[in-house]
Every structure is written in structure tokens, then in C-alpha cells.
Image (cartoon, helix red, strand yellow):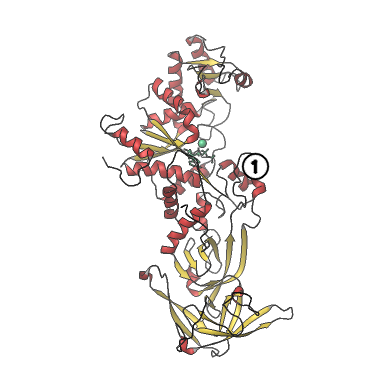
Amino acid sequence: MAEITESRNFIDAFIQEDIAEGGQYAGQTVHTRFPPEPNGYLHIGHCKALTIDFGTAEKFGGICNLRMDDTNPAKEDTEYVEAIQEDIHWLGFDWGGRFFYGSDYFEQTYQYAEELIQKGLAYVCELTPEQFKEYRGDPSTPAVSPYRDRPIAESLDLFRRMRAGEFPDNRYTLRAKIDLASGNFNMRDPVLYRIRHVEHHRQGTKWCIYPMYDFAHPIQDALEGITHSLCSLEFENHRPLYNWVVEHVSVPHRPRQIEFARLGIDHTVLSKRKLRQLVEEGRVSGWDDPRMPTLCGLRRRGYTPASIRNFCERVGVAKAPNTVEYAFLEHCLREDLNAHAQRVMAVLNPVKLTVTNYPEGQSEVFQVENNPVDPASGTRPVTFSRTLWIEREDFMEQKVGKFFRLFPGNEVRLKGAYVVKCTGCIKDETGRITEVLCTYDPDSRGGDPADGRKVKSTIHWVDAANCYDAEVRLYENLFDDPDPDAAGKDFLACLNPHSLEIRQGCKVEAALAHTKPADRFQFLRQGYFCADVRDSAPGHLVFNRAVSLKDSYKPAK
Ligand code: ATP
Ligand code: MG
């Protein structure tokens, strides 16, 4: 068995104990599962669960099932099922053909319920939902359950008639007979089955009784031979019930549930209900809006699988709830793209720069580095001519403060090309600057001036005679409030009205003409950008800013 030495967390430690000699799964293959409910798209919180479920199995040379948790018959859709599979594959995990639906086990689950009745461990109850609440008791008062001693034969008959559809919704429930005085309310004779005359997306109208999650889930795990059922912390109080179920029905396996803390991220919401509301109310363009914390949104924004997996691994597996800075997620992306993204020049707020001493009609080629961090990436040709585009912000008619870029009389280096000296500008009748003027120093080709003059700034530029127009979408946090997900807060009121800025008429260098959707670049001095998978096409380039260059993440000391 593989010995886990690097990055061993508390789950790994439990598992290692379990599979060691004398442990409860000695010699067995570690078998986990990821059980998403197909009622929305996966978000970054799910990635943490995924990384733990698939990643733990991987570490131990085990296997991980993908199971759609469709026990609850509401709001499920094949659109979600397919999207979930696509997202998991994109992240680089695989379930190797072990794809299941929780609803496939309805018949077996039903049979186990009958088994409990026959063992005197479950009974049919006829409290209304309101009475059920009223009779629950409190920490010092046991619950009251008047139908607890219903004879086995009578419960069995009623349960079969519940299945046969003889009763309306909520008329009866099936309850486990455990402990009405338990300090854990989940053990106070919990409901196992309820009547709901609702069509199921895969089972149709076959069923009008549905098992509760707490009953169905351990059975599904056990039937699939799961050894370790890893889930988030809200199920901790349900673990005694999980254990009770696998102990008292004759399932072939006894899985072990281990809980970990959910991931929270600031400036975002990680609840499918809230994310769905953003989509349905048109607050964002869809589940894959690049501002969404969904996997498809992050992917469209420009996130790489490596950056997300790396983020989840570095966030770690802990028992204590953790909220992580969104800035840390961005930091992980920046690290990955810094190492791998090709550098190009793009001007997002263009103004013309005319090199007045450069002959009209002339053009020359410079070789510019593709990625200085990766010398193997080589160089590419970039053309230069008399008319260029530069950023409007790189020129000031009157220099203010520590501004070292273009202003009349000052020199700057044009990245990879010449040193130029600003000589003035031209304005239209409204006073708006339409053109900046400069002269170039032919003796500074590709580097510093020959006489050793020092030039403080280097700016990016694009050859106006050889460039393409592009639309660029600049994003900020979807929520400006750091904690929009807080209980009781109106998360819609926390939306950032400036989370999307669209710039038309940006100028990008010729190398970008053949950009394919999802290609990623560093736009020099601007950030990392990704060609939009929906809207970008040759002749209509659209780029999303994945992340800016400025890193606001400060690691804790
Ligand atoms: P939501 O609250 O967004 O609807 P959920 O828990 O209902 O989430 P499921 O589809 O049931 O969504 O989740 C599948 C798995 O992902 C579960 O095991 C759940 O514990 C886990 N999970 C969901 N959100 C997070 C999170 N923020 N951090 C860690 N794990 C999560
Ligand atoms: Mg859930």
C-alpha cells in the first residue's frame, strides 16, 4: 500500500489507519464518491469536495465514483448532469465508468425499509408535519411519538399501501425507532420515508414515496462498496444516524463517514440557490458568466484546471470552517499564467502616436520575447511603423507628480523597439487629444540609446498599420461586500454595479489574429486575458480579463 508522506491531512491519517493491518478495511482498495445534486452547476466550493474525494482516492491508489444525488425529486435536469460531468473532466478527474444515480437504488432502499419494519426498528407514523415539530421535545425533554408501538404487521401493511399510492402527501411517514430522548435530534426517531406525489426526472411516476437523504445516502454508499464517505461538516451531526443505518440493514458494506469544513470565499456566494437566482433574474449572463464562482464561469474567465486544483490543495483540508480570500484564488491563477502565458501587446484605451521623423510607408520588424519566464518560448515578429497606438493614460500634456511616461520633452522606450521623445500633441475642437507626436532615436534600436542616456519608462504599443480591433471585458468582484453570503444579508444588495466594463475598439498586435477561443495571454502591463469561448471569433476578437497583474494577496505571516 502506498505510504502517504507528502501533504498528509487528517482524512489521510484516518484512512491510513483503516487500511493498515488490523484496521476495519485492512487490505481493501480505498473507494470514495462525489455525490452532487444535479440542481445547478458546480462551483468552487464543490471543487474542494471534488479534490478531496477524487484526490484522496488517487493518493491511495483507490477509486472514486460519481453519483448524481437525485433522491429528492425536485428541480433536476439533464443539462446539469452533463455540465457536472464536463466540469469534472475539465479539472482532470475521472470516475472510470463508475457513474451512478442515487435514484437507481430506490427499489433496494425500499426493501431495506421493509427490513427495518420487520425487525421492529421502523414504524409508520401519522403525525402531521406541524405535530411532528410540536412533539420533538427540547434538549431536556424527550420527543413524543404516539405511533411508536404500532404492531409490525400493521406498519408493514401501511407502508406498502403508502407505496401503492393510497394516501395523499404527508398523511403518513415511516420513522426509524431509535431514541426519543437522544441529545442528538437526528436520532429522535427520524423520518425515513415521506409521501410525495411528484414525478421524478428519471423514475417518472413509479414512486410516490421518497426516502430521506439520511436514509438513502448511507445505503447508496454501502451498495457501491464505498469505504470512505467524505462530506462537509454540516453532516457531522448526522453521522450517528448514518452509522445506525448501515449497522441495522443488511447492506454488503459498512462505509465510514468523515467530515471536512466547507470552503467559503470572500466577495462571493457559494450556494446554488443564490447562484441560480442571479442567473434567473438576469443579474449575470448565465451560469458561465465570467464573474460567477462556478467552474464553467471560472473556465470562461480564463482559469486553468491546474490553478484551481492548486488552490484547493493549498487551502487544505481542515475541520475548522475556513473562509479564503478571493485574492488567493487570483494569486494561484497568476502564478500559473505567469509561468505559461504568452506575452503580447494590446492597447485598451488607444490614442495615436505619430513618429514624425519615421518615413511614411516604411515598416520594420522586431523580434519580441514570447515569455521571459520561459526562454524556450522563443520570440515573435512585431512590426513597427510611423503610426502606432498607445494607451491614452501613457501621455500627459502637463506632467503631474511622479509621471515618467510621455509628456512633451520626455523620452520613453517603446517595448522591444526604439526610444522616442515626445514633442507635443494634436487636439480636436473639443480639446480632446487625438494624436500624440514624437521623434525616434535611430541609434536606440531594440535597446538603450547609443550615448548611454537613461530612460525611466517602457510602454507597450501596437503598430496601427498592422493590428486588429478587439472587444475587451474587464471584471471586478461580483460583490463589493466582502461577505454577501452571510446569514440574513440581502446578497442582491451587495452586488458590485461596476463588476463588468466593456471596452470596444481596443487594438491588439497582429499575432492575435488567429486566436482561438480559450487561448490565454498576458497583455503587457495589463493583466492576463482569455479569448471568450462564446463570443470570440476571427474578425471579432473578444477577450476576458482573467486577472490583473497587481497581486493584492498577502500571505499570512
Ligand atoms: P449548495 O449549498 O451550493 O446547494 P450542496 O451541498 O447542496 O451545495 P451538493 O450538490 O449536494 O450541493 O454538493 C455535492 C458535494 O459538494 C457535497 O458533498 C457537499 O458537501 C460538497 N460541497 C458543496 N459546497 C461545498 C463547499 N462550499 N465546500 C466544500 N464542499 C462543498
Ligand atoms: Mg447537498
- The residue that appears at 49% across and 17% down in the rendered structure is 179
Residue at the front extreme of this rendering: 557
- Please tell me whether residue 532 is drawn above or below residue 138 in the rendered image: below
Side (left or right) of 489 relative to 550: right
Q: Alpha-carbon neighbours of circle 1 within 10 Å: few (<14), some, or many (≥20)? A: few
- The residue that appears at 52% across and 51% down in the rendered structure is 325
Can you give x and y, in whole percent of width and height, for residue 412 in the image?
53, 81
> Which of the two residues, 137 or 79, is positioned nearer the viewer here?
137
Q: Quadrant of residue 147?
A: top right
Type of amino acid under label 1: Lys
Task: Return the residue at label 1.
Answer: 489
> Which of the two residues, 430 or 250, is positioned nearer the viewer here?
430
Can you give x and y, in whole percent of width and height, for residue 276 in the image?
59, 44
Side (left or right) of 156 relative to 399: left
> Which of the two residues, 153 or 332, is positioned nearer the viewer here?
332
Can you give x and y, in whole percent of width and height, for residue 101 in the image?
45, 35
- The residue that appears at 38% across and 68% down in the rendered structure is 374
Residue at the right extreme of this rendering: 429
> Which of the two residues, 374 or 109, is positioned nearer the viewer here?
374
> Is residue 330 visible in this depiction of the protein?
yes
Can you give x and y, in whole percent of width and height, for residue 15 in the image?
34, 36
- Please tell me whether residue 14 is drawn above or below residue 535 in the rendered image: above
